[in-house]
Amino acid sequence: MTLGLNGDAALIRREVFIEEQGFCDEFDEIDARALHLVLYEGETPAATGRLFRGEGTDGIVYWIGRVAVRKCARGRSLGRTVLAALEAEAARLGGSEVRLSAQLQAEGFYEKQGYRRCGAEYLDEHCPHVEMRKRLK
């Protein structure tokens, strides 16, 4: 994991969120202070996600975001691997909970990983999202 956005994480996010899904505002100020994880298949960047500390009323909360797997690398559990690694890092840093903003089309995936809804649906650009959370052990 590296602090700040690197070229491989940006490449994956650009491919998945901008080119494939049509988002415009993919990169933000959080990128500079977040930890970024990139998974590789051989030398090829395949999946990414970011982790940053947020505010919480009952312990330390970390946010996971921008989890993306390139189309050519899907179907090999890389999304689960990214989530597990980011959750482990949040726990190592003293986090009691992780949260994320899930696209509704991915809500079932996150539920299978132990996440539960904790907010109302909302639009992020053109895409419906919902906030989800998971307690860490």
Image (cartoon, rainbow, N blue to C red):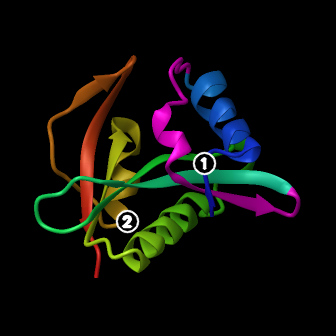
Magenta highlight range: 22-43
Q: Find residue 23 and report its horizontal and vertical position in percent.
A: 52, 21
Amino acid on which disc 1 is placed: Gly
Which residue occupies 53% across, 41% down? Answer: 31
Count up the numbered dots. Answer: 2
Quadrant location of residue 90? bottom left
Q: Pointer 2: what residue?
A: 113
**Residue under label 1:** 4
Residue 117 locus on image (x, y percent) = 20, 50
Q: Which residue shows up at 16% across the image and 49% down it?
A: 118
Q: Point out the image quarter for the N terminus.
A: bottom right
Q: Residues within 10 Å of mark 2 (few under 14, many from 20)?
A: few
Q: Earlier in the sequence, mark 2 or mark 1?
A: 1
Q: Determine whether the residue tagged by mark 2 lies in a helix, strand or loop.
A: loop
The C terminus appears in which quarter of the rendering? bottom left
Residue positioned 50% across, 21% down in the render: 25
Describe residue 114's horizontal placement relative to residue 17 as left or right: left
* Of 111 and 63, the residue lying toward us: 63
